[in-house]
Image (cartoon, rainbow, N blue to C red):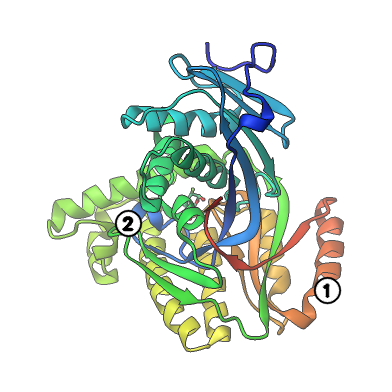
Amino acid sequence: MSTSKSNTNKETTPEKQKHIIKVASPGRINLIGEHTDYNNGFVMPTAIDKKIYFELSKNSCVSQCNIFSETYNSWVQFDLNDFSKSNESWENYILGVVNELLKSGKELDGFDCKIRSELPIGAGISSSAALECGLAAGLNELFNLDLSKQEIAELCQAAENNFVGSQCGIMDQYASVMSKKDHLILLDCLSLDAEFIPADFKTCKILLVNTKVSHNLAEGEYNNRRKECEHALSIIQSRYTEVKTLRDVTIDLLQDCKSALTKTEYNRVRYVLEENNRVLNASQLIKSGELQNFGALMYQSHYGLKDLYEVSCNELDFLVKFTEEKDYIYGSRMMGGGFGGCTINLIEEAAIEGFIEEVTNAYEKEYNITPETITVVPSEGTVVS
Ligand code: GAF
């Protein structure tokens, strides 16, 4: 038996005896460095001020877990000794975390959990990592599991890879857990060395524009991209044994291997090399306050994702193009896995209101969909209290 929607067999401890653990687990943005994490490259994410909130407590059962999501108005209930994958994707993020904790030898007992989210789903701001990491951080506290923050991030990535079936990299979980308020993370996804860069956007803010579309090829294509890159890497390594990951590949070396790669593989690798360089350049530009030059890299990132990595879609391209002639927008690009979700825009704060009106009208006219606009602030990672 895996999960059940009914709450008839719930047993809970009376409210007054409960020790309640509260967790606030944020979504994330990524300034630049897309699809580079699972290629052992560089990314620049941070947590945002939009979160999922958890309340967890032990119950009087040995192994019964009762979790209620306000977003889905639905329960996931399961026995720690007997559960399997669910047809409901949100439940698998929960079950995946529990599964990974048990696999790693952590001892859990029955618990109750209530979840309330202010993160839009499918918007590319990683509500899934927030869900996984919030639950893992809460269980860590509730059962004294002694996991470090980084271990929580890695465990949640493993849950997604092994249980949910998405071969994601570490970026989302790392950002959700490890971020520092008002900072960006320059993360080396190979060593997990992180530099925290002050997020000084001067007169600008970060504005997300949500296409409100989520094309269903997203997950399959995501896993395909990873396979294409791994295959390309193995071909390059057969000629250049010193190459350990795609970040060791230079443009000259790639040219040299061109005839051994398919056109698609060549394009994927080229994108990854260029994006890694952009992330490193971007970190310097942000540190020196050259925000317009940084914005130019955001546009380059978008066009690489569109033309070489092929993970964009018409709606995202429309939104990015719409910003191009606007001198109060320094940069715009698709964010996250692609095929829908949000664009991230670096925009002069004073221009936000007018732009929202303009882009909403234009997008409605083109797609008959009202986009969602969200201003976000770089924030602290998961907080447990
Ligand atoms: C998704 C994945 F979960 C991340 O690991 C990352 O690869 C991202 O897509 C693309 O940069 O959010």
Up-down relation of residue 53 to residue 373 (above or below): above
Between residues 361 and 136, which one lies in front from this camera angle? Answer: 136
- In the rendered image, residue 6, in percent from the top left (x then y), is placed at 69, 15
Mark 2 Cβ and ligand 1 under 8 Å apart = no
Look at the numbered discs 1 and 2 and tell me whether their residues touch, using CB distance below 8 Å: no
Residue 265 appears in view: no
Q: Quadrant of residue 101?
A: top left
Between residues 180 and 197, which one lies in front from this camera angle? Answer: 180
Up-down relation of residue 379 to residue 176 (above or below): below
Up-down relation of residue 201 to residue 68 (above or below): below
Packing grade of label 1 (10 A; few <14, some 14-19, many >=20) is few
Whole-angstrom CA distance, mark 1 to mark 2, is: 38 Å
SS for callout 2: loop
Residue corresponding to mark 2 = 40
- In the rendered image, residue 217, in percent from the top left (x then y), is placed at 57, 39
**Taking 218 as reference, is 345 left or right?**
right
Seen at 46% across and 50% down, the residue is 173
Task: Work out which residue is located at the far front of the displayed protein and give it.
Answer: 17
Up-down relation of residue 68 to residue 177 (above or below): above
Report the amino acid beneath label 2.
Answer: Asn
Residue 99 appears in view: yes
Q: Quadrant of residue 380?
A: bottom right
Seen at 35% across and 61% down, the residue is 41
Between residues 366 and 68, which one lies in front from this camera angle? Answer: 68
**Taking 98 as reference, is 53 left or right?**
right
- Who comes first in sequence, dot 1 or dot 2? 2
Packing grade of label 2 (10 A; few <14, some 14-19, many >=20) is many
SS for callout 1: helix
- In the rendered image, residue 341, in percent from the top left (x then y), is placed at 65, 52
Seen at 60% across and 49% down, the residue is 339
Residue corresponding to mark 1 = 353
Report the amino acid beneath label 1.
Answer: Glu
